[in-house]
Amino acid sequence: MTRLAALLWVMGGTVLAGVFIMIVLMIPSLQAEAPKYILIAAIVGYVVGIPPAFMAAKAITQRSAS
């Protein structure tokens, strides 16, 4: 299950990091310090993607075992 969760996390974390980066880029008040906030948004996106990846991996393994 951990390998499946890792694969899902790589994909989901990338998507979430991209979404958070786009949010940073779309807010005009964050433009002055965008490089700092882009890095923070990318890290937060990857970290936030961990729990959903494990939940999805658990659901997939339970359904495939039945």
Image: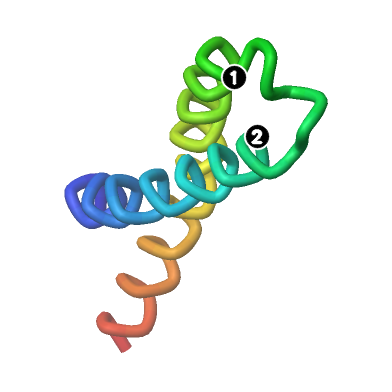
Amino acid at dot 1 = Ala
For this rendering, which residue is in front, 50 or 60?
50
* Residue at x 40%, y 54% (from the top left corner): 12
**Quadrant of image for the N terminus:** bottom left
Mark 2 vs mark 1, CA separation in Å: 7 Å
Position of 61 with respect to 59 (left or right) is left
Query: Measured along the vertical axis of the image, is residue 24 above or below residue 13?
Result: above
Picture quadrant of residue 22 = top right
Asked whether disc 2 touches disc 1, contact meaning CB atoms under 8 Å apart, the reply is: yes
Report the front residue among 35 and 49.
35
> Which of marks 1 and 2 precedes in the sequence?
2
Q: Which mark is residue 24?
A: 2
Taking the image as shown, residue 30 lies to the left or right of residue 20, namely right
Badge 1: how crowded within 10 Å, few (<14), some, or many (20+)? some
Q: Is residue 52 left or right of residue 62?
A: right
Image x and y of residue 31, in percent: 68, 23
Q: Secondary structure at mark 2?
A: helix
Q: Amino acid at mark 2?
A: Val
Outermost residue on the bottom side: it is 66
Task: Classify mark 2: residues with Cα within 10 Å, few (<14), some (14-19) or many (20+).
Answer: many
- Image quadrant containing the C terminus: bottom left
Residue under label 1: 34
Q: Position of residue 10 (x, y in %)?
A: 28, 46
Q: Residue furthest left?
A: 3
Residue at horizontal 81 percent and vertical 25 percent from the top = 29
Name the side, left or right, on which 33 lies relative to 53: right
Q: Position of residue 52 (x, y in %)?
A: 52, 53
Q: 20 above or below 34?
A: below
Q: Label 1's element?
A: helix
The disc label shown at residue 44, or none: none
Residue in the foreground of this view, choosing between 23 and 44:
23
Residue drawn at (54%, 38%) of the image: 21
